Amino acid sequence: MDDFYPAGDEHVLVYEVTGRLVPAGGIPLARGVVVNNVETLMNVALAQGGIAVTRKFVTVAGEVNRPATYRVAIGTTVAHLLELAGGVREEHRSDFEVMLDGPMMGRVLDRGTDLGAVQVSAITSGVIVLPTRHPSLTERRQSMEHQVRMARSACIQCTMCTDACPRYLLGHELRPHIIMRTIGHAADPALADRPREREELLMAGLCTECGVCSLVCPMGLAPRSVNARVRRAMAAGGLRWNTLSGDDGTRVRLHPARRGRLIPSGRVAARLRLGQYLHVEELVEA
């Protein structure tokens, strides 16, 4: 497989390995495929041997003195992980934030969070320490109200977010630029009331929040965050992406320009200014 983002998306992975297109809104099993990551398969093998899953591989990266992948007990605190990693580098000890999991889809802990109370779970994959003013944190600090105002005033409808969307390129009816246009002009920014607006916003139900749309936006807007807000509104209202259209998701067709629009992982890291943190090679049994 080529090195691009998000190669780990299960729909993308299924296509790259088998050439099969998973239906929009569907799961790989619909095409006779089961997707599991390497750690899960290892844990399945251990469980078959009667060994319970009590430990987890967690990569600690960013502004720490000993970046590495640590195998720790589930329940280990983030504070202890940072201790294992030699602590935060001196120049940022009073000016840092912590992100759990990956830089594109991870969650930033609120400022002032007690790191001794945040524990590694069975799904935690990473801890990234970043300077408070790091550009990767900018989008995550913006309120929804700010993002709607920006969509209304600054979105130029260039379609770059849609052109690069991994699910759109796999033939899914997900067009982030339309969602941005609609939410910028709808009477109700959460979920529009008019049928056409409503159907346009329901496309957000196909979004995986991978963040490629926000990455490529030339105006610095955040379609990913807008989609996430709409998805929450849909869930609260019991709506799915195809509630109005009745589409079963099977009429997917690969975009002919897909191969030329894939974004190399290294380019993603450079765009997020994370390239200096990529070299994590040590594995530590803690």
Image: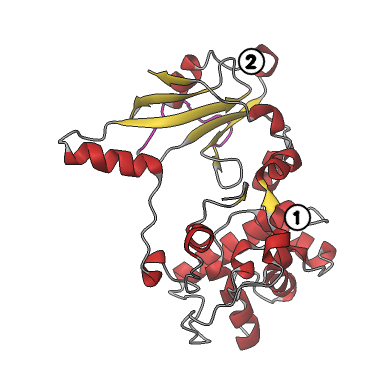
Instruction: From the top left corner, tell me how far across and down residue 63 is, in percent.
Output: 63, 22
Question: In this view of the protein, which residue sits in the foreground, 272 or 108?
Answer: 272
Rendered location of residue 134, percent (x, y)? 72, 34
As drawn, 127 above or below 179: above
Colouring used for the render: secondary structure
Is 156 a magenta residue? no
Q: Quadrant of residue 93?
A: top right
Residue closest to the eye, 210 or 205: 210
Can see residue 44? yes
Q: Amino acid at mark 1?
A: Val
Residue shown at the point (70%, 76%) measured from the top left = 186
Q: Nearer the viewer, mark 2 or mark 1?
A: 1
| Nearest the eye: 23 or 149 | 23
Q: Residues within 10 Å of mark 2 (few under 14, many from 20)?
A: some
**Rendered position, 251 above or below 137:** below
C-alpha separation, residue under disc 2 versus residue under disc 1: 31 Å
Main SS class of the magenta portion in the image: loop
Is residue 189 found left or right of 135 in the rendered image?
left
The residue positioned 63% from the left and 79% from the top of the image is 200
As drawn, the label of residue 174 is: none
Picture residue at 44% right of the left edge, 24% below the top: 70
Q: Which residue is mark 1?
A: 216
Q: Position of residue 217 (x, y in %)?
A: 77, 57
The answer, for residue 119, to whether it is visible in the render is no
Callouts 2 and 1 close, C-beta under 8 Å: no
Callout 2: helix, strand or loop?
loop
Could you tell me the amino acid type at mark 2?
A: Arg
Residue corresponding to mark 2? 89
Relative depth, front residue between 28 and 146: 28
Residue 119 in the magenta stretch? The answer is yes
Q: Which residues are magenta?
A: 109-121
